[in-house]
Image: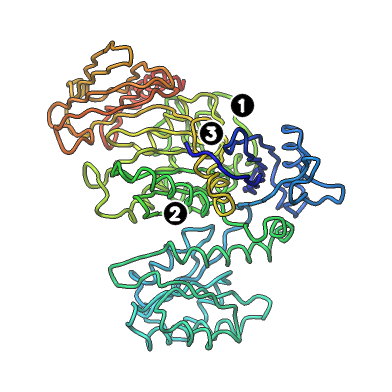
Amino acid sequence: MSTLTVNADSVLAIEIGSINTRAVLFDVVENRYRFLGAGNALTTAGAPFHDIMAGVREAISQLEQATGRTLIGVDDRLILPVQADGSGVDRCVATMSAGAPMRVVAVGLLEDVSAQSAQNLANTTYAQVVEVLSLNDRRSTAARLDAVLRARPDVIIMAGGAEGGASRSVMKLVEAVGLACYVTPKEQRPPVLFAGNQSLAKPIRDELAAYASVYIAPNIRPAIETEQLLAAQTQLAEVYRQNRKRHIAGVDVIESWTNGHLLSSAMTFGRTIRFIGNEYAKTRKGVLGVDVGGSNTTLAAAFGDNLKLHVNARLGIGENLPGLLAHSAVDEIIRWSHMELSEETVRDFIYNKAAYPASLPVTNEELALEHLLTSQIIQVALKKIMRSFPSEAFRAGAGLLPWFEPIIASGSVLTQAPSRGQTAMTLLNALQPTGVTTLALDQNNLAPMIGAASSVAPILTVQALDATNFINLGTVISPIGQAQPGVPILRVRVMFNDGSETTHDIKYGALDIINLPAGQSATLHLHPLHRFDVGMGGAGRSGSVKVIGGMLGLIIDARGRPINLPADPGRRRDLIKKWHWTLGAA
């Protein structure tokens, strides 16, 4: 673990979510950054306050009580920097996911190439694509103009033209965008983010500057077979910041406190996952992050330095929960329940939760429903992001999750579950990991704030990613292959530090726990049978791996991929109930 050799700044990190606002304090203790405490309050972006600062100040007040440090002065402002009496902080960063998603019109030359890349860029932040324009949509300039006006966008994202490629065709689309901006009332004109052929950046700025704010980003489709979104996200973050500032009261105050370090929570969550991905690059596996919020669900996957980020801006476990029904039938959700549930019960819960997003489950049935729905949300989000995974990502077969190490879960529905087994069950059913991986829980939901803090205190990112903040739920071993239920498919030999060892024969269809106390290391010798693949270099190949025991020990998930549930409802519920008992989730 890195230690500090110079004086470092204390950092206040604020996260303004759709339901909760959190304030977290990091400072140096014994030559390394530590998480000192947190305060939590309901977000006040909506009625009756319509100003995020009420929630922010309440969260900071709770933080002051928890830490004994004064952060807000008598003038109601944040004390910057730290004063001689110890009050205040040196730096402040903030992330935000509250507020309605930005409405986006995506523009590109070809609908399934550059226009798709413009949509993919929009999906890296809290945005909803409401219209797509492309040359091959065969609409006239007038029809395209009408489409933009009907869409009432908050931003227009333009892509198109490989480097050194098409220019006249791009300018034809610019004509429609320019006309739309021109006829829109000045105070409602959307900014334009151009992320196409860089030789056209100046002509496009000259063409549109009189009618709209123009942002220029690196080409997200520099070649027809190449998509590069990461560099353009910086300019998109600025568009997002300006949008929040226009539409949500109090953002300007946070902006002054942070000196411009106000970013989307999704972007900073992805930044943290990308940092971890670089740290684990030598494993040749990716790193996966899952963050389930009240209004949005974010998945981030890092393959070394290559980050894939997807925000589902209308899919969350709070006010946007009814959006799940656009992707999943109710019976799909019920299939994973160990309780007998009616469609009416599920629908009633969904709409009640949407009406009262801050409500907590008070019965076993409500808890089961909340986690069933969370699992389904993650499944829907996973299908979307998997389309963008690099083809060279290591995996056991088409359609299966690539090898990941670790998988990090964030979001209160996962981190605040009554039992760790409930969280593990939700993640295993939703993600269906393969090979050998570790389930880690961001128990204080720090990942977005750590990513934000990296811009002002890079060493904080390194030192905050430890076992006190990210707890190990358990190593998961998921052999991949086909067999009849009950057939032995894997032999696991566990060698403990004291020299003792145990051997376990794993049968297809089983979900088992092997006892390994939290924090204790061991060496696993994995010997697959019947050409099952455990990620040791190919089907049937054996190997050894060192692991550290998690909260649940070692989890053996031999249920197959994808998991096939019994058709009979009674047998299915009994089997799922058995799985819940195994993990302590019942």
Image position of 65 (left or right of 422): right
Q: Amino acid at mark 3?
A: Asn
Name, please, the residue furthest toward the right.
74
- Residue 153, percent across and down? 56, 71
Name, please, the residue furthest toward the front.
5
Number of the front mark, 1 or 3: 3
Residue 369 position (above or below residue 254): above
- Residue 140, percent across and down? 43, 86
Give the number of the disc on residue 310.
2
Q: Amino acid at mark 1?
A: Val
Q: CA distance from mark 2 to mark 1?
A: 32 Å
Task: Please give the count of numbered marks on the rendered protein.
Answer: 3
Which secondary structure lies at badge 1? loop
Residue at image x 62%, y 45%? 8
Give the number of the disc on residue 469.
3
Q: CA distance from mark 1 to mark 3?
A: 27 Å
Residue at image x 59%, y 53%? 456
Classed neighbour count for the residue bearing mark 3: other residues with Cα under 10 Å, few (<14), some (14–19), many (≥20)? some
Residue at image x 40%, y 54%? 307
Asked whether 17 or 139 is in front, the reply is 17
Q: Upstream in the sequence, badge 1 or badge 3? A: 1
Give the number of the disc on residue 362.
1
Circles 1, 3 touching at the beta carbon (< 8 Å): no
The quadrant holding residue 29 is top right
Q: CA distance from mark 2 to mark 3?
A: 24 Å
Q: Is residue 348 visible?
A: no
Which secondary structure lies at badge 3? loop
Which secondary structure lies at badge 2? strand
- Residue 579, percent across and down? 37, 22
Residue 579 position (above or below residue 40): above
